[in-house]
Amino acid sequence: LALHQFREYKLARFRSGFRSLVTGQIIQIICGALLALLGGSFWVDHLGVAHLMIYGISLHLYGVMMIVFAARDLFMIKTFDYAAPVLTLQKQIAALRAWHLRTGLWFGVAGCFIWIPAMLMIFYGRGADVWRHNPDVVGWFVLSGLVCLGVLLGIVFWSRRPGREKLAKNLADSAGGRSVKRAQSLLEEIERFETE
């Protein structure tokens, strides 16, 4: 009876622990939809002007990426089988964490560059077609994005070297998310209690 009550209490905390993640993913879907609409309407309004279409298509695709990644998170959370053995739940959480690690890298890489078309769209909206009138600025923007990408990938690869396990763990925990980390801890508590 005590084991059953303990398990039910921890699983209730496990379920409620995902509320903030679910809320965040819903907000991400809304932001992604707004960005996709903004980018989509921009490139459709500028058909035939290649560089303006590139700005809009880039933001459109980034918005779609935000929607798809958040929707996959929500789907994975929705399919958790709370009545399953702890080991099954641990595997489901591990899959969610692995997904977060992959999407974190995708968002990091995209984030190094997505600000460029966003900034150029803002400039264009204020009456300055930077690409056409000052392409060197665009070159500097791209160079900045490449430097950012180099730093990001450098940190990722450096953290995987021997002796950097703590940094790698901190990066993985950060990318995995607090909700996922808490869920893993709760399942470990249940597992320990069941084995005692």
Image (tube, rainbow, N blue to C red):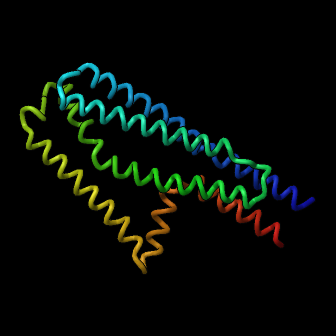
Instruction: Kindly identify the residue that appears in the image at 44 percent across and 70 percent down.
Output: 167
Residue 33: x %, y % from top left: 44, 29
104 sits left or right of 194 in the view: left
Q: In the figure, residue 150 lies in which quadrant? A: bottom left
Q: In the figure, residue 156 lies in which quadrant? A: bottom left
Check the image and report above or below for 176 versus 75: below
Check the image and report above or below for 173 versus 57: below
Task: Tell me the quadrant of the picture where the C terminus can be found.
Answer: bottom right
153 sits left or right of 99 in the view: left
Residue 30: x %, y % from top left: 48, 31
Check the image and report above or below for 113 versus 93: above
Residue 74: x %, y % from top left: 59, 41
150 sits left or right of 179 in the view: left
Q: In the figure, residue 155 lies in which quadrant? A: bottom left
Q: From this viewpoint, which residue is outermost toward the top?
A: 45
Task: Tell me the quadrant of the picture where the N terminus can be found.
Answer: bottom right
Q: From this viewpoint, which residue is outermost toward the right?
A: 1
Q: How many marks are shown on the rendered structure?
A: 0
Residue 181: x %, y % from top left: 59, 59
Instruction: Kindly identify the residue that appears in the image at 28 percent across and 24 percent down.
Output: 42
Instruction: Kindly identify the residue that appears in the image at 42 percent across and 39 percent down.
Output: 65
Instruction: Kindly identify the residue that appears in the image at 87 percent across and 61 percent down.
Output: 3
